[in-house]
Amino acid sequence: MSASLPSVLVVDENAVRAAIIEAGLREAGHENVTIVGDVKGIAAKIAALEPDVVVIGLENPNRDMLENLFQMSRAVKRPIAMFVDRSDRDSMEAAINAGVSAYVVDGLKRERVKPILDLAISRFNAYSRLERELEDARSALQARKIVDRAKGLLMRTRGLSEDAAYQLLRKAAMDQNRKIAEVAESLILAADLLGEKGTDGGND
Amino acid sequence: MAATTDILAGIIPLTDSALLVVARECGFAEEEGIGLTLIRETSWANIRDRIAIGHFQAAHMLGPMPIAATLGLTPLRQAVIAPMALGLGGNAVTVSASLFEQMRAMGPIDVLAPATGGAALRAVVEKRRSEGMPPLQFGVVHPHSGHNFELRYWLASSSIRPDQDVDIVITPPPFMPDALASGQVVGFCVGEPWNSVAVASGAGRIAIVKSAIWRSGPEKVLGVHAGWAERNGDALARLIRALYRAAEWCGNPKNHAALAHILARPDYLGVPASLIVKAIDGSILEPFAPRSGIVFFAPFAGAATFPWQSHALWFYSQMVRWGQVAHTAAHAEAARHSYRPDLYRAALKPLAASLPGASAKVEGALKAPSPVGATSGTLVLGPDGFFDDAIFDPDKLDEYIAAQRAEAD
């Protein structure tokens, strides 16, 4: 029954990632999930919500503040400890590698927490993968723009066709064992330094 | 020369990460066959976790952190040792412009005489209480930090009870200036450059410097996992030598401008070099104290990188004082041995450096720079007094703890 599942508080300034985790928890039947982006006034929120599990990203600079809150604050009625299962070093390492940590109220059984941590780990990893893919796509786009500019430069200065300009870049890249975008970048830089006209035609 | 050893070390964006940064950037690590990579972290908790699982072999740590980790006061109980200190001093207490004015209305404030600011703050606190206003809130970076303990020491010696007369909350160092500007806290104790950043923005005024609360007082240490240190004794010794040479470089006034530029880089502090240099060369004190012999931040001179066991025991005494741990002989011994002057001496032996002969000293005994017993040559230690003239004798730890407890009752 979902009503018996632990309540979860996700502290994440990254709204997209928080939504991804929330969706995952809800799919797994967790109805009592709260997302907090801004940590201002979090002591009062924790006191009101009394979460069983608190999930927070490692890149959040407020971890020290939260840990202190869990240990010392009068507002937090139930002691909360970091989820560390000494016998399960792998899951701790997986969590740290994924960039997430979880804090659990005292006395909650590990079988009830482990699935939440595992889910947070997989969603954090999925989000990082997405972010990497997005970054790759951005740099691929950037590389194509640079190659286009270099082609334009060769076409204008050497009177080449687009295809011939590309073949020239490709050959230079192969000869020098470099990427085409790198050769294109050096070409644009060299042309800039030599005061070659028309190199600024590729404003992004 | 042995093969290169790769060491991954965590740092927090603070001026006293300088030794690690310089060891990497100026080639001192490389000369010792260490491939040193630095990772800027966002919290001390991350540093602790990554040391625990072995991501990091070494880290920039708050002086009390190895003690807290060894005593199991934070999650992931683990034996962490400090085989070297990363400098002395370097912190300040900054208050909001408005609180500073209120304090000054109560009496003159001399940032180098903490008793003056303490008396002024007490008067403000008493006035607020008589008017039924809530306690003022101060920020520190971590419960197990020199900042927390020196702020509390200053308050308590000024007859202001922490947690009763004023509240103390935890705020990450880079957030301190914003927390002050937005009124979340009215003051904080933090390392540089974050006091200077708050002052430059107009939000804060430096009220007290740490090096006046406790002259030649300890701050950050090199933290390593005890197990790693045992298995990698040679690599650790090489790292200590690299950091020692980096400290010597940092301590040379000729290098201060270059150091500030390196630290200013976006991958380190990301703060203008003009702000950082003042904390390094001590000119941060100039507006207040042209006369003073107080050193703001000491990276090298005065055995600034020696891991004094008396420093560890003082931090421990304050953990007891503020209810973080119960005092037992076993706890005190664990705290003492989390600082490892033996490893420091052994590592530096090939350099024939002038190192302290003792592993602990009576804190507050030296009123002026004094020559002390050293392994070779002469070694001069700076004055090490507390501002209230109290003496901490590590051999009389029980009495010190008892006296502080009696004061609180």
Image: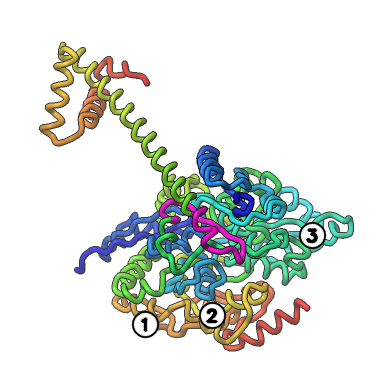
Determine the secondary structure under disc 3.
Answer: loop
Corner quadrant of residue B138: bottom right
Provide residue B391's location: percent of width, then percent of height.
Answer: 64, 81
Give amino acid for label 1.
Ser
Magenta range is: A95-117
Say if labels 1 and 2 share a chain.
yes
Q: Spatial distance from mark 3 to mark 2, Cα to Cα?
A: 35 Å
Q: Secondary structure at mark 2?
A: helix
- Along the polypeptide, which appears first: circle 3 or circle 1? 3
> Label 3 to label 1, Cα distance in Å?
48 Å
> How many residues crowd mark 3 within 10 Å: few (<14), some (14–19), many (20+)?
some
Amino acid under label 2? Ser
Residue depicted at 12% across the width and 32% down the height: A174
Of the image marks 3 and 2, the number of the one nearer the N terminus = 3
Which of labels 3 and 2 is toward the front?
Answer: 2
**Number of marks in picture:** 3
Q: Give the labeled residue for mark 3.
A: B107
Where the N terminus of chain B falls, by quadrant? bottom left
Say whether residue A76 is left or right of residue A175.
Answer: right
What is the chain identity of the residue bearing mark 3?
B
Residue A111 in the image: state x and y as whole percent. Answer: 52, 61
Q: Which residue is mark 2?
A: B310
Q: Which residue occupies 67% across, 76% down?
A: B321
Protein chain holding label 1: B
Q: What mark, if any, has residue B376 been given in the picture?
A: 1
Residue placed most toward the observer, B117 or A7? A7
Q: Is B391 or A143 nearer to us in this picture? A: A143
Name the residue located 62 percent from the left edge and 54 percent from the top edge: A4
Q: Is residue B107 visible?
A: yes
